[in-house]
């Protein structure tokens, strides 16, 4: 369907500036020349500038892990869309850790998405259910609601600019993953079908979907071959040159 595969690393709250630059330089070398796939890393805010410099002109893009929606003002501790845009192209919005620990809601996620789009940033929007919701059979309804909330008042044209990361919360950092078949089914029924009801099939088919949650070199291929899955948002395994490179290479090999 013409969706370009996209793998991004979420470095979370790891690495000093020097460590982040070292990782970025290593990835610049190890991932050089890959054009079949979009690649990005999302360092912590303090390292955004240095990592952007280290990856300038390379095939590895840079993203922030969060952002506020106002352009400037008395919002202590926050980054504005202008500040993020100054340094990078992508921004992760609504990661489950932000929702769980820092009070993000579907409404704040929606505001942030709108601000990111208004400033020409490419948002990676995270959704996913908890273990309790999964066990109670509520996944499709819950994720569907997250999608409706995230996309409220967003045009079809803008919707196409988003990448969605389906990350079951119980799979993040735990070593557990959804089975590729199950992740594919959720993305189809809870995400793509809801998007189709909002925007029509053509727009829904155009939106890229990453899987996230304990993606490692050994399981990447099984996810990327699924029809609905266009890549991954990688946490722990994105913190080392070798493992992130192996994920990208294994995905490349598995692509048709
Ligand atoms: P993980 O994190 O790969 O360490 O499970 C994924 C994420 O939170 O994006």
Image (spheres, rainbow, N blue to C red):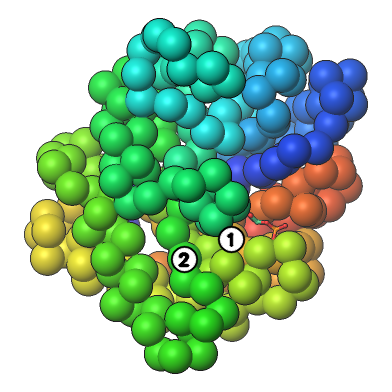
The answer to whether residue 36 of the structure is visible from this angle is: no
What residue appears at the point 80 percent right and 37 percent down from the top-left corner? Answer: 14
Residue at the outermost bottom position: 136
Mark 1 and mark 2 lie on one chain; the one further toward the N terminus is 2
Disc 2: which residue: 128
Instruction: In the rendered view, tell whether residue 225 sits above or below residue 243.
Output: below
Q: Position of residue 219 (x, y in %)?
A: 71, 71
What residue appears at the point 69 percent right and 30 percent down from the top-left corner? Answer: 43
Disc 1: which residue: 212
Q: Is mark 1 within 8 Å of ligand 1?
A: yes
Q: Is mark 2 within 8 Å of ligand 1?
A: no
The answer to whether residue 165 of the structure is visible from this angle is: yes
Name the one closer to the observer, 56 or 50: 50
How packed is label 1: few (under 14 Cα within 10 Å), some, or many (20 or more)?
many
What residue appears at the point 72 percent right and 19 percent down from the top-left corner? Answer: 46
Q: Which quarter of the rendered image does ligand 1 occupy?
A: bottom right
Spatial distance from mark 1 to mark 2, Cα to Cα?
9 Å
Q: Secondary structure at mark 1?
A: strand
**Left or right: where 72 falls relative to 22:** left
Q: Position of residue 6 (x, y in %)?
A: 52, 47
The image quadrant of residue 51 is top right
Q: Position of residue 53 (x, y in %)?
A: 70, 10
How packed is label 2: few (under 14 Cα within 10 Å), some, or many (20 or more)?
many
What residue appears at the point 21 percent right and 67 percent down from the top-left corner? Answer: 194
Name the one closer to the observer, 127 or 41: 127
Is label 1 or label 2 in front?
A: 2
Label pair 1/2, CB-CB below 8 angstroms: yes
**Left or right: where 136 falls relative to 244:** left
Q: Position of residue 202 (x, y in %)?
A: 16, 56
Q: Give the quadrant of the N terminus.
A: bottom left
**Left or right: where 115 falls relative to 90:** left
């Amino acid at each position: 369907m013409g969706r370009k595969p996209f793998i991004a690393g979420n470095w979370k709250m790891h690495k000093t500036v020097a460590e982040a630059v070292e990782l970025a330089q290593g990835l610049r070398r190890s991932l050089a020349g890959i054009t079949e796939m979009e690649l990005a890393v999302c360092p912590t805010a303090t390292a955004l500038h240095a990592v952007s410099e280290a990856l300038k002109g390379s095939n590895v893009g840079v993203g922030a892990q969060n952002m506020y929606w106002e352009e400037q003002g008395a919002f202590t501790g926050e980054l504005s869309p202008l500040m993020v845009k100054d340094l990078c192209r992508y921004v992760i919005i609504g990661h489950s850790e932000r929702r769980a620990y820092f009070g993000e809601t579907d409404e704040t996620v929606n505001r942030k998405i709108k601000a990111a789009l208004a400033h020409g940033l490419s948002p990676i929007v995270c959704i996913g259910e908890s273990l309790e919701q999964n066990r109670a059979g509520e996944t499709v309804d819950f994720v569907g609601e997250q999608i409706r909330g995230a996309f409220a008042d967003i045009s079809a044209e803008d919707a196409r600019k988003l990448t969605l990361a389906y990350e079951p919360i119980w799979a993040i950092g735990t070593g557990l993953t959804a089975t590729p078949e199950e992740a594919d089914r959720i993305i189809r029924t809870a995400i793509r079908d809801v998007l189709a009801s909002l925007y029509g099939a053509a727009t829904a088919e155009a939106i890229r979907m990453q899987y996230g949650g304990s993606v490692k070199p050994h399981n990447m291929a099984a996810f990327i071959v699924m029809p609905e899955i266009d890549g991954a948002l990688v946490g722990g395994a994105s913190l080392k040159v070798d493992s992130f490179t192996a994920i990208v290479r294994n995905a490349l090999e598995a692509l048709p």
